[in-house]
Amino acid sequence: MSEFFNMGGYGLYVWGSYGVTFALLAIEVVVLMKRKRETKT
Amino acid sequence: MTTDSIRWFWYSSPQTFFPLAGRIARICAVLAVVFGVAGLYTGFFVAPTDATQGEAYRIIYIHVPAAWMSMFLYVVMALWAAIGLAFNTRLSFLMARALAPTGALFTFIALWTGSFWGKPTWGTWWVWDARLTSELILLFLYFGYIALQATIDDRRRADRAGAVLAIVGVVNIPIIYYSVKWWNTLHQGASVSLSQAPSMAATMLTGMLLMALCFWAYSIAVALTRVRAEIAQVG
């Protein structure tokens, strides 16, 4: 398991990429859902 | 009139488009999750380790699809803007407006993941080479479009000004795409193209295409949800 997260020594780069990508996508979805709730009465 | 019977503009009315957009958005949201899980599983557990780059290459599964989306969404945005200018259909401008934030997001992701890939493989986070610079210009084009929409109060003028900017900016897309051929760049050429067999392992390619489908479905779902919010706000 720790081997998987280590990514052959490239853990920082791989997870740094994936983490930021999915965090940003999640933020966009959350912001949009919030806006959707606000516009619909 | 005969053109009435064809009803080309039926769905160009925001009110008729609203429920359809909702249905498509829901389907695409589900598809995005399905393709995303399948793509990540293939990318991390099925595809082998790269012979030269080790595990660092696994960034490809988000980097390449994000870069594709960044360019594709821009073209679609400019296309909607052009249709809006030509036919003066309000929904077209709403679509262009709805696509911009997601396009900018994918452009940023392409640059960010590229940077995190460049550091272990090239030894640097950033170089001013043709591919990277033109992609950065794409990000600024998106920002420019969004800023223009935000700063011009008159909605119709904002739409038209934004449309002109978006259409002119399309020039940058072939520059990004062919930059690796036209100039000597650090960035590698395309591993997947329409004219040649892909130069990568089949499982790697499968994972990458699944992630591309995930990003496609995600973009459609998000853009349509945003356009629905716009319609609900301004009518």
Image (cartoon, coloured by chain):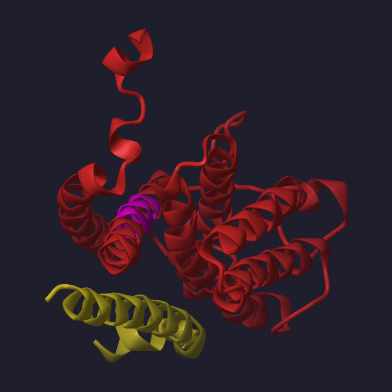
Chain colours: A yellow, B red
User: For this rendering, which residue is in front, B204 or B182?
Assistant: B182
Image quadrant assignment for residue B215? bottom left
Image quadrant assignment for residue B46? bottom left
Left or right of residue A21: residue B119 = right
Q: In this view, does B51 lie above or below A37?
A: above
Measuring from the top left, give residue B87's x and y in whole percent: 52, 35
Whether residue B50 is visible here, answered yes or no, is no
| The residue positioned farthest toward the right in the image shown | B183
Q: Which residue is drawn at 29% across and 75% down?
A: A32
| The residue positioned farthest toward the top in the image shown | B2
The quadrant in which the C terminus of chain B is found is bottom left
User: For this rendering, which residue is in front, B81 or B86?
Assistant: B86
Q: Residue at x 16, y 56 (%)?
A: B26
Q: Which secondary structure is most common in the magenta stretch? A: helix
User: For this rendering, which residue is in front, B17 or B173?
Assistant: B17
Question: Which residues make up the magenta segment?
Answer: B210-220
Left or right of residue A13: residue B186 = right
Measuring from the top left, give residue B128's x and y in whole percent: 83, 74
Q: Does the magenta stretch include residue B211?
A: yes
Whether residue B32 is visible here, answered yes or no, is yes
Q: In this view, does B192 lie above or below A24?
A: above
Measuring from the top left, give residue B41's x and y in whole percent: 25, 63
Q: Does the magenta stretch include residue B16?
A: no
